[in-house]
Image (spheres, coloured by chain):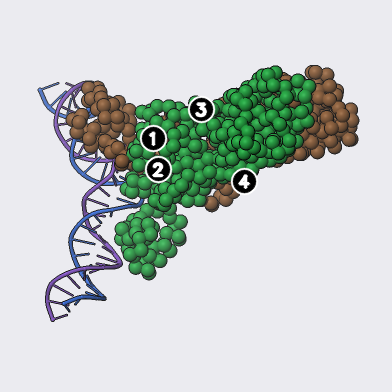
Chain colours: A green, B brown, C blue, D purple
Amino acid sequence: MTPKPRPTYSVIAKEAGVSEATVSRVLNGDDRVDQERAAKVLEVVERLGYKKHRAATALASGRTNLIAVVIDNDLSVFSDPFWGTVTSGISRVLMENELQTLLMVTSVSSVDGPVAHYLNTGEVDGAIFFQLHKDALVRKLAKTGLPIVITGSPHAATDFVFVDTDNFGGGHAATKHLINRGCKKVAIIAGDIETVAGHQRLDGYHQAYRELGRVPAKTLTAYGDYSYESGKREMTRLLNEQPDIDGVFACNDLMALGAIAAIEERGLTVPGDVAVVGFDDSLVAQTSRPGLTSVRQDIVALGEAAAELMIAQLRNEPVEPRILPTELVIRESA
Amino acid sequence: MTPKPRPTYSVIAKEAGVSEATVSRVLNGDDRVDQERAAKVLEVVERLGYKKHRAATALASGRTNLIAVVIDNDLSVFSDPFWGTVTSGISRVLMENELQTLLMVTSVSSVDGPVAHYLNTGEVDGAIFFQLHKDALVRKLAKTGLPIVITGSPHAATDFVFVDTDNFGGGHAATKHLINRGCKKVAIIAGDIETVAGHQRLDGYHQAYRELGRVPAKTLTAYGDYSYESGKREMTRLLNEQPDIDGVFACNDLMALGAIAAIEERGLTVPGDVAVVGFDDSLVAQTSRPGLTSVRQDIVALGEAAAELMIAQLRNEPVEPRILPTELVIRESA
DNA sequence: TGAATTTGTGAAATCGGTTTCACGCCTTTC
DNA sequence: GAAAGGCGTGAAACCGATTTCACAAATTCA
């Protein structure tokens, strides 16, 4: 009926004929302990199925074995499968390393809010943030020495540890593919240019043009907000102004689908008249008709990388930001 | 550079001119404390921005303020946006109640595995499980008195506390809608019948027929696995065998899209020749063409309800399982 | 008015680990 | 052969809260 009473150091120590201090040493890998005694302790630990009490350990050592994953409530958390997938990757890797994932879905905005306070006071050993609009909070926390990893690129060129998809490379590959398949006039529907990811995808587009020795006309760049509607709206506008556009790189799949709808409404065909490439290779890209050619990012790997960078920091190992490669998945739309 | 040193009871007590015991009483709502002294303590707490040390509190009180959210790694965790959305709802509500979410993405299979041990030994105050294939573990944990909530219906008719979408009602509404719009021969592509949700949706389909005083032919029931491919395959088969089918209820959106593909490949139109209804009202339902009529479940609300039931249990309030209503979202496909 | 409660309070024990410190024993060193 | 140094060890302090217990003061009851 009540939780199984757990053994404590006192029991282990008695059973193994040593002091509690020695038990602690053995269990924390202090190698100054006599081989035989250590073996005896381990044997008892094994036999009794002993596991340390988290709270007691945390209190005494100051380390909690808890890593916070902070997700801003203000973002489109509720509809976006992205963060959930990343988080599952994070959690799995952390668990394999005896760390637990503390999930905080909350409004991160305030530098002095409860989250800030919470992270500031040793309640967790580290924090993994999802890309933020403002990084004032993170900046402040970093000053306290709290290990931090950011999923997504931070705004300024700081020395934050981060993991991100190769947005630039993805944008470049998408555009290049359109050019290679013979498109003469490739437009782009960019996403929120305020985000680093949005900007980098646009940069990749420019780079692909540059390699041809050309510069895309400013009028070929449209700005959406990652929604289906914005994709459709912008595509309609682009085609009104420049009917000879024959390729489009939309910076996410939803906008790409919107663009396809706009193109077909005009009586044109995809990819016959206009080829379309999206970004994310989400479920909608796989199930739409025509199937959407899209830039795939390995989202689980992103989470795993974030966790690995956190673990490296905790071990005081040198840490470099990690950029994960993308892959162009070719379907019917381009 | 180092984390801000936090005040402790000893500081508060000294500052307020009382004992640490009294500080504890005030902070834990023990009302036997003199008004003035209590006020003084609260003033000091406020002024110093004091927050309890989690580990110390947990060690002394035996309560951790941690709720585990356990997700089986074996499930389709990595692609399914469902659990992430539910979890965000859970986390938000828990946080509002000063509880933290401990996320465990792991293989739950073993009754004696690390998860079992972890949950079994007072490391968390409660656990929220996602629908499981086998509930042996949950059953065992429940015996220890650990508060548990299950997201999704448990298999047997047990007294577990759970929250779930009204799958029966959703299946009923979907089928009814098809019948009402004039379909004479409505088929169903059921999902995994092993899951309770899958079974309930099928039951809802039957019920709608029953209300007409009819019983659907067995041959009108096909079984898929929730994938696009299975939807397409089963729809093709159904139409081969019974070309006069004029309505289909697919038990999730992906299978519905597969069905639509099969129908159109055959040269038939949706909804002209065959009307189609899906389940989930996921992103793909909203962006597909024709737009997919689908049964919407409020996934965030599901998470919130799970958290609320957990909190009620912790407060020793009476708790009833919660079934959340669905809503039929009508688009072009039916 | 005196005895019996009730009430508010602080000292101290407690939760289960970690870490400091001092001690005894054994090896070097000159 | 004595002083110096190193090593393994356990006793005890410590982490920061909660809770028990005893006691004095205030209240109630007879």
Provide residue A157's location: percent of width, then percent of height.
44, 37
| Local crowd size for mark 4, using a 10 Å CA cut-off: few (<14), some (14–19), many (≥20) | some
Looking at marks 2 and 3 on the same chain, the residue that comes earlier in the sequence is marked by: 2
Residue wearing tag 1 = A139
Location of residue A197 by image quarter: top right
The reply to the same-chain question for discs 2 and 1 is yes
As drawn, is D27 to the left or to the right of A224? left
Residue wearing tag 3 = A194
Circle on res. A147: 2
Q: Chain of mark 1?
A: A
Q: CA distance from mark 2 to mark 1?
A: 11 Å
Contact? badges 1 and 3 (CB < 8 Å): no
Location of residue B81 by image quarter: top right
Q: Chain of mark 4?
A: B
Q: What's under tag 3, amino acid-wise? A: Glu
Q: CA distance from mark 3 to mark 4?
A: 38 Å
Q: Secondary structure at mark 4?
A: loop
Residue found 40% across the figure and 53% down from its top: A7
Q: Secondary structure at mark 3?
A: loop
Q: Secondary structure at mark 2?
A: loop
